Amino acid sequence: MTVQEKGIFYKGSNFYVMEDGTIVGEPNLRGAIWEMALALKGQSDIKEFLEEWSSCSNRCTAFPYYWTIADEREQYINSVRGEYVYDPQNAEIRNIKNILEEMNENRDIDLPDDLTFEELVDSISDICEEDLVEELLKKYTGELSLNRYTQEWETYYEGIFFTEEDAKEYLESCKNHHFGPNPRVYLESFNKWGRHSRTEEFLQKLFNFFNVPVPPELYYEKEKK
C-alpha cells in the first residue's frame, strides 16, 4: 500500500484515514476503532500534561524552563589558614579545633604562661594565628607540611521536570535517603543565557500543535486578570 504522506489524518497498522475521511486499506473494524481510541487517549494525556506545564508559575523565568532539585553539599577548599586539616592517621579531613581538644585532653600540649587553651583555639584561621597551632598540627599528623582547608557549601542540581508538582512529588519520595538536609524545588531555563535553541522551537511547535498557550504567556494573562 503506497500513500503520499500529505493528507493523512491517522496512520493505522494496516490502513490510513485521510483528512477527507476516506479510508485506505482493509482495516479490521474492531481493531481499527481500538487503535484510534488508544491514539486519541494518548493525545489527550499529552495535551493535559502540556496544559499543566503551561499554567505553572514561571517566576519570571524565560521559556523553555524546567524544574529541578537544588541541594547543597559540603566541599573543602585549600586554604593556608583553613580551619580543617588532612589527618593521615585517620585518612580524613578533620576540624582543627577537635584535634587540639583531643591533644589537650591527652596532655600533648605545652602552653606558654601567657596563652590559654581557649585563646589558642580562638586563633585558628586568624591572620595572626599562633605559630603554635601549626607546630601542634605537624606534631599530631607527623607531617612536615600541612594540607589545610576551609569548608564551603556547594549548590548542585539534579533531575529535569516539566511541572512543579512532578518535581515536588519526586523530592518527597526520596529526600529522606538521597538528598542533603535542605533540598528544594528550583526553576531553571533551558536557554540560560538568552540564546534560542532547537529545543525551544520544538516545544513551541508541540504546544501549538495541541492548541495550548506557550508559556509563560498564559501565566502573565492570569496575573493581569
Image: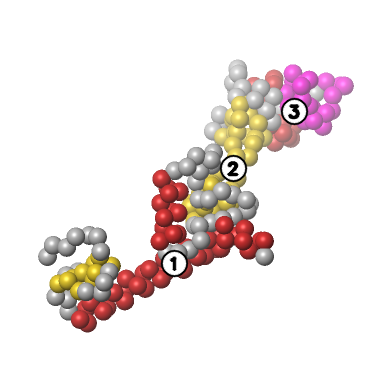
**Numbered circle sitting on residue 223:** none
CA–CA distance in space, label 1 to label 2:
34 Å
Say whether disc 3 or disc 1 marks the residue closer to the N-terminus.
1
Could you tell me the amino acid type at mark 2? Thr
Element assignment for label 1? helix
Image location (x, y in percent) of residue 122: 80, 30
Foreground residue among 119 and 83 = 83
Instruction: Determine which residue is flagged by label 1.
Output: 47
Q: Is residue 12 visible?
A: no
Q: Give the range drawn in magenta.
A: 112-133
According to the image, label 2 marks what residue?
Answer: 155
| Residue depicted at x 83% and y 20% | 112
Q: Do the residues labelled 3 and 1 touch (CB within 8 Å)?
A: no
Instruction: Judge by depth and name the residue closer to the eye, 98 or 168.
Output: 168
Q: Nearer the viewer, mark 3 or mark 2?
A: 2
Depicted 152 relative to depicted 201: above or below:
above
Q: How is the image coloured?
A: secondary structure
The image quarter in which residue 222 lies: bottom right
Image quadrant occupied by the C terminus = bottom right
At x 25%, y 64%, the residue is 7
Read off the residue under disc 3. 124
The answer to whether the residue labelled 1 contacts the one labelled 2, judged by CB atoms less than 8 Å apart, is no
Closer to the N terminus: mark 1 or mark 2?
A: 1
Mark 1: few/some/many CA within 10 Å (<14, 14-19, 20+): some
The picture places residue 160, in percent across and down from the top left corner, at: 48, 52
Q: Does 4 sit left or right of 106 as displayed? A: left
Residue reaching furthest to the bottom:
30
Q: Is 132 in the magenta?
A: yes
Where 36 sits versus 157, above or below? below
Point 74% across, 20% down: residue:
132
Residue 157 covered by magenta stretch: no
